[in-house]
Structures are given as structure tokens and as C-alpha cells.
Image (tube, grey):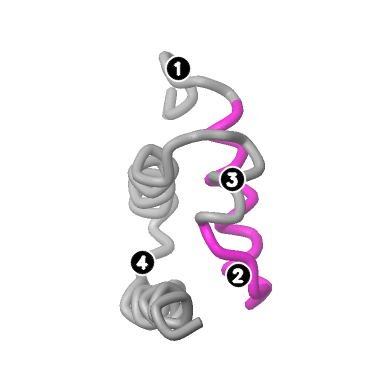
Amino acid sequence: KNFTQGRRKAPVTAACLYIACRMEKSQHMLIDFSDALQVNVYVLGTYFLKLRRLLSLEKYMSIIGKLFRVGAYFMSFLFY
């Protein structure tokens, strides 16, 4: 549905890979892809959410659990 048209290839590919990692229950986080590609994590998050909605994957992937895990990840740095 022309999702890639007008978008940069690297963030779209990263969003696809992140979806695959989420479906396989991998421990990779969106920020890992952001760091590797030097792309803003919010841009990747936007691409991920739009692609997830386009592919109708909302019912398969819960965003809430991941937000808690990311929050715990950042909290661990506060007490390091």
C-alpha cells in the first residue's frame, strides 16, 4: 500500500526487523535499532506503529508490556 514510498529505506527496514523480532519474542528493543542506524528512536517508533497498524498486527503485539520493559531499562541507569 505504498508504505515505503517517500520514506527512507533504513528506518522502514528497521521497523520491519523490529516487528519480526517482536513476533519471535526477541529481547531486542527499538532503541537498539536506533543506535545501530543512528536514527531518531521516535522516527523508528512512528514507522513501527504505522506499519503495525497497516499490517493489522495490533492484536498480536501489545505495546504496553514493551513500554514497561523500556521504562525498567532506563530506571536501571538511574541506580547504576
Q: Which mark is residue 58?
A: 4
Q: Which residues are magenta?
A: 10-30
Q: Which residue is mark 1?
A: 5
The prevailing secondary structure element of the residues shown in magenta is: helix
Amino acid type, callout 4: Glu
- Using the numbered discs, state the Cα–Cα distance from disc 1 to disc 3 in whole angstroms: 24 Å
Judged from the image, the secondary structure of the residue bearing numbered disc 1 is loop
- Using the numbered discs, state the Cα–Cα distance from disc 3 to disc 2 in whole angstroms: 21 Å
Judged from the image, the secondary structure of the residue bearing numbered disc 3 is helix
Q: Which residue is mark 2?
A: 23
Mark before the other along the chain sequence, 1 or 2: 1
Residue found farthest to the top: 6
Q: Which residue is mark 3?
A: 35
What residue appears at the point 47 percent right and 82 percent down from the top-left corner? 76
- Using the numbered discs, state the Cα–Cα distance from disc 4 to disc 2 in whole angstroms: 11 Å
- Using the numbered discs, state the Cα–Cα distance from disc 3 to disc 4 in whole angstroms: 25 Å
Asked whether the beta carbons under mark 3 and mark 4 sit within 8 Å of each other, the answer is no
- Foreground mark, 3 or 2? 3
14 left or right of 73 in image: right
- Using the numbered discs, state the Cα–Cα distance from disc 1 to disc 4 in whole angstroms: 23 Å
Image position of 41 with respect to 32: above or below: above
26 left or right of 70 in image: right
Mark before the other along the chain sequence, 3 or 2: 2
